[in-house]
Image: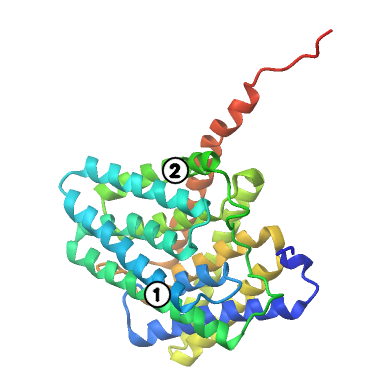
């Protein structure tokens, strides 16, 4: 059965998936803001990643396994960072290997949340550790807590808006049946790692809050980018970042005018409903709105609760950083994809025997 929402004959399933996504993200955002957690963008960002991919809630065993994987992967990255912090060259090589393996696993159909947590840990913990080891440990704890809350939120969202056998996810995942072969996945994983590595190297040497924003944006864009869709689709992801950034700026400034918690929840729900509706109905353009939702969550969360040791930068500065990261990622991917195209162009031309 096709899992393209545009061909779903039952619009109730589409509405249910969109409502589930919007409710889950908003409820998660409200919870972490009410509890006063650090880096409040983490839990709703992970929740959004889960609910845009899942057709059914994870089982109890799957949920427990995800939480264990999150804890183990975050602990491994933190241990690697602590071990090689005094040897930047070795640290960067170790991080490159972890990025490559996580991208390969993601392309081959590994659990979306698990691979995202590994990549988020790799691009954030070393950068924070350079400035403050204590901040890195705190962020690692926030990552594990956010993963746990994301799994719980997914269960609650599916309980509130249950799916059935005819349901589809807002964005169809690249499951095992549609996953690229080992050779193609290895090549794409290497390409993604090469795109991230120069920026990661730069920010490991000079840490700042900007680094975490830029690197997470690039990671999300690379995860949404489909090489076979061409450059136009890649440029659309920049548009998605712009849409999400502008929406975050509008909501943030409205919240500043009316600093009440219920108003924040209502504004967050309105914005996420708009994004979820487009994700559920945009078909092949859904990745643009997935990126927009992720950027909205990231920028709004950083505005409400900056990273430990960070400052409350102006939204225009944050948005400029997001657009810069998007432009870099698209440009770097376009250049490196010549590697993919060149073997085809250089292939010998077969002529028919006379």
Question: Residue 106 versus residue 29: which sits nearer the camera?
Answer: 106
State the residue at coordinates (49%, 40%). 332
Report helix, strand or loop for mark 2. helix
Determine the image quadrant of residue 18. Answer: bottom right
Residue tagged 2: 195
Quadrant of the snapshot with the N terminus: bottom right
Residue 253 seen from this side: no
Quadrant of the snapshot with the C terminus: top right
Residue 102 seen from this side: yes
Question: On the picture, is 127 further left or further right than 282?
Answer: left
Point out which mark residue 64 bears: 1
- Which badge, 1 or 2, is on the more N-terminal residue? 1
Crowding around mark 1 (Cα neighbors within 10 Å: few <14, some 14 to 19, many 20+) is some
Question: Residue 26 versus residue 182: which sits nearer the camera?
Answer: 182
Question: Residue 3 versus residue 244: which sits nearer the camera?
Answer: 3
Residue 157 point in image, percent of width and height: 54, 83
Q: Nearer the viewer, mark 1 or mark 2?
A: 1
Colour scheme of the rendered structure: rainbow
State the residue at coordinates (47%, 85%). 257
Whether residues under marks 1 and 2 lie with C-beta atoms below 8 angstroms apart, the answer is no
Estimate the spatial distance between the alpha carbons at disc 1 and disc 2, rounded to whole Å.
Answer: 33 Å
State the residue at coordinates (63%, 70%). 169
Residue 94 point in image, percent of width and height: 28, 45
Question: Residue 321 versus residue 164: which sits nearer the camera?
Answer: 164
The total of numbered circles placed on residues is: 2
Determine the image quadrant of residue 55. Answer: bottom right
Residue 52 point in image, percent of width and height: 57, 69
Question: On the picture, is 180 further left or further right than 6?
Answer: left
Residue 89 point in image, percent of width and height: 23, 40
């Amino acid at each position: 059965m096709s899992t393209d929402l545009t061909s779903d004959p039952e619009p109730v399933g589409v509405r249910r998936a969109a409502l589930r996504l919007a409710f889950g993200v908003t409820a998660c955002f409200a919870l972490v803001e009410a509890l006063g957690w650090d880096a409040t963008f983490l839990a709703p960002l992970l929740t959004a990643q889960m609910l845009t991919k899942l057709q059914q809630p994870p089982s109890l065993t799957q949920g427990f396994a995800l939480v264990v994987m999150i804890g183990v992967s975050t602990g491994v990255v933190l241990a690697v960072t602590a071990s090689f912090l005094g040897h930047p060259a070795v640290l960067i090589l170790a991080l490159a290997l972890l990025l490559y393996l996580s991208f390969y696993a993601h392309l081959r159909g590994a659990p979306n949340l698990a691979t995202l947590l590994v990549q988020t840990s790799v691009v954030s913990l070393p950068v924070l550790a350079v400035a403050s080891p204590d901040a890195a440990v705190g962020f690692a704890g926030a990552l594990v807590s956010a993963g746990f809350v994301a799994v719980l939120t997914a269960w609650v969202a599916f309980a509130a808006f249950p799916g059935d056998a005819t349901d589809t996810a807002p964005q169809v995942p690249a499951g095992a049946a549609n996953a690229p072969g080992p050779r193609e996945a290895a090549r794409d994983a290497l390409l993604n790692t090469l795109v991230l590595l120069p920026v990661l190297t730069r920010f490991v040497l000079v840490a700042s809050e900007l680094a975490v924003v830029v690197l997470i944006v690039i990671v999300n864009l690379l995860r949404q980018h489909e090489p076979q869709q061409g450059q136009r689709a890649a440029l659309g992801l920049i548009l998605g970042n712009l849409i999400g950034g502008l929406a975050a700026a509008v909501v943030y400034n409205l919240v500043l005018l009316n600093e009440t918690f219920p108003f924040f929840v209502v504004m967050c729900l309105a914005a996420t409903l708009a994004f979820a509706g487009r994700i559920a109905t945009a078909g092949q353009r859904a990745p643009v709105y997935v990126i927009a939702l992720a950027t909205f969550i990231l920028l709004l969360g950083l505005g409400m609760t900056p990273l430990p040791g960070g400052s409350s930068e102006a939204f225009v500065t944050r948005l400029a950083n997001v657009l810069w990261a998007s432009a870099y990622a698209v440009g770097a991917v376009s250049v490196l994809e010549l590697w993919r195209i060149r073997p085809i162009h250089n292939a010998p031309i077969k002529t028919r025997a006379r």
